[in-house]
Image: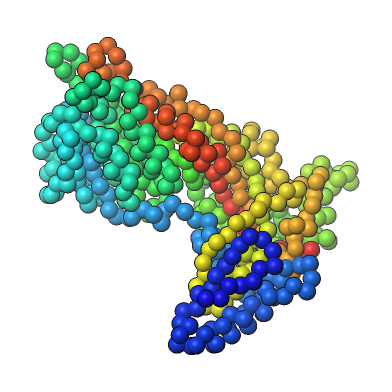
Amino acid sequence: MLEIPRTSGATRVKIFMASEKSLIGKTALGIVAACLVGFGVLSSCSNHIPTDDGGKYSTYIEEFHYANFFKGIDAIESGNLSLYIDYSTCNVLGQNSAFYQALVPSWTAATKNYYSIKGPDISKEEGPTFNLLRTIQEVNYADLKSAIEQMANSNSESVLLTDGEFYQQSIAKGNINNPYMASALKTWLQKGHDIFVFSEPYVEAYKGQSYNKKRFYIIFTDVRLRDNIYDRIIQTVKLQNFPDVEMFHLSADHPSLAAEGTSTKPNDNLSADVKGFGSFEAQEWPIDWKDGIEPLIAFAVNPQTGETLPNGESFTGGLKVDRNSFGGYRITDVAAKVYNINQEFTEFCAAKQAGARYKADITLTPMDNFIKLDGKEFQKHGIINLYFDSQMYTPDPVLNGSPYNFIKIDICVSGVQDMFSQFAHQFEFDSIDMPGQTNTSVAESIKQCLADPDIKTMISTCPIYSIYIKAPER
């Protein structure tokens, strides 16, 4: 094992040689040392950090991002959907529902594990999913709390079909305002995943009275997962044919951009080369700072008057955020955080060039007084434009690389507004065991999950998009 000495920062990068014993360490260490000297990592002759990327900037940036900052989707297993069926009246009656039947092909094609919830028993059933769904017989008192907790603690997609009525043969009975799902919802969201709920109204007769109930299709998935069950549904079911069915999306991570496959548009004066990777991008700026970037952009002048513009010109922007990405919260504010990654990225490149294994252990500190975000434009149109902080411009802590500077910018959520009250009605239904009252247990579960301090922190600090920049030294 070789530890690369650092000249600054809090990162430790360890390179593990593939075969120390067979090479007696000498050849492998020699390769690493040669690469590090070539990159200048071992040098400390000036105030600048020697930097290089081996001429593979966009390739290495993509690998660097996934190695250090990507989370969530790798923890979920693809192609292993579990279907949980509440053996209650709602799914017996579902045989007569056009929406229920429209979803059956999705369950049939994707389900690998079928679980029945018959009273307190949650059992894996064998046989074709289509046949199992066609032969549901009512069993009362489904243990929905245990079922959804089992879903949340799994590492694969799952779906629960239920009326949401967690009835216990005790004083609690129908738990009409018990947020019994809240803990499970939180568990899944903390993994960085998504929850979708389709809410279908139906009428259920009981002891001579009719009750307005809801049939819930609760989907635990991740929208970043290839061929996820939610995508399968929206691609094969014409939801517009079911106007009474409402859908709700719950997430605490990876808010969406307004359009897929977009990237920011750099200022023309930068002559930037841009490569997008979905949730992040890599820009390469060929022009210098003192004769190009600073006079033309950071401290740009009005061409008509010759006066310096208050904020200069935007150096990149045009990215539009879906401010309703979280479902229960609306994004009200965003912030831009900039990081000097000269040391971290150069060490990563050195490890790659050496053919050595890289172990991520990075702590980045945001730098102040270098860039800022146009908050007014975001408030008006949800669009993100970035400027240099011309009023407080302090470039030295960021631009200390030679011959290149490597910069990371994170666009993060910084403010949200609770909007769930607008959607709570989707999850409320008539109580059967307490006639005349409303069962709010599912609504309260979502409400309490969203109010949880851990979930609120996730949402209010969530990264939206990252921009990596390679620029010349200053």
Residue at x 65%, y 48% (from the top left corner): 337
Residue at x 16%, y 38% (from the top left corner): 121
Image location of residue 383, percent across then percent down: 62, 41
- Left or right for 135, reference 244: left
Residue at x 39%, y 31% (from the top left corner): 446
Q: How is the image coloured?
A: rainbow
Quadrant in the rendering for residue 449: top left
Q: Which is more toward the observer, 187 or 236? A: 187
Q: Residue furthest right?
A: 306
- Left or right for 54, reference 191: right
Q: In the rendered view, tell whether residue 232 sits above or below residue 174.
A: below
Image location of residue 164, percent across then percent down: 27, 29
Quarter of the figure with the C terminus: bottom right
Q: Which is more toward the observer, 402 or 377? A: 402
- Count of numbered tags: 0
Image location of residue 403, percent across then percent down: 74, 70
- Left or right for 190, reference 81: right
Q: Which is more toward the observer, 59 or 393? A: 393
Quadrant in the rendering for residue 293: bottom right
Residue at x 15%, y 28% (from the top left corner): 140
- Left or right for 334, reference 245: right
Whether residue 202 is visible to the viewer of this picture, yes or no, is: no
Image location of residue 93, percent across then percent down: 17, 29
Q: In the rendered view, tell whether residue 156 sits above or below residue 328.
A: below
